[in-house]
Image (spheres, rainbow, N blue to C red):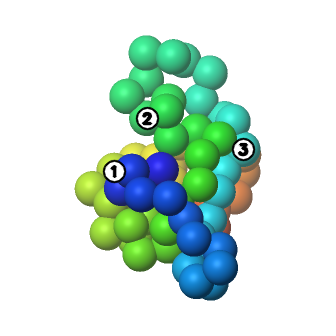
Amino acid sequence: MICGQSIDIDRKEEFGATTHFIADQHDPLYRYSDAAFHRSCFLSWEHRDEFSAKYKKVMGRKVAEFD
């Protein structure tokens, strides 16, 4: 999670998630690989562009439809 808060599916919060795609445990973004995130948090996240670029390079597509 980007913000550290749980995703409340009962409140129908928009969220996304990635599969595990960063193998290097020393990569500062490693902990966000194979993680869920609120849509609003992801869109305003300071590391969004770098994270998205890494995901696209490994997985060949955008992180989520809202990216």
Residue 55 in picture, x, y percent from top left: 60, 46
Are dots 1 and 2 in contact, CB under 8 Å? yes
Report the Cα–Cα distance between label 3 and label 2.
13 Å
At horizontal 66% and vertical 35% (from top left) the residue drawn is 21
The residue labelled by disc 3 is 19
Judge from the rendering whether residue 37 lies leftward or rightward of residue 2; answer left or right.
Answer: right
Decide: is 66 above or below 61: below
Disc 2 marks which residue?
Answer: 29
Callout 3 secondary element = loop
Report the amino acid beneath label 2: Leu
Per the image, the residue denoted by label 1 is: 47
Q: Is residue 4 left or right of residue 52?
A: left
Q: Position of residue 13 (x, y in %)?
A: 56, 79
Q: In this picture, is 62 found above or below 28?
A: below
Q: Which residue occupies the foreground of this view, 18 or 10?
A: 10
Q: Local crowd at mark 3 within 10 Å, few (<14), some, or many (≥20)? A: few
Q: Which amino acid type is marked by label 1? A: His
Q: Position of residue 5 (x, y in %)?
A: 42, 57
Mark 3 or 1 closer to N-term? 3
Judged left or right of residue 12, residue 30 is left
Q: Say above or below: 66 vs 63.
A: below
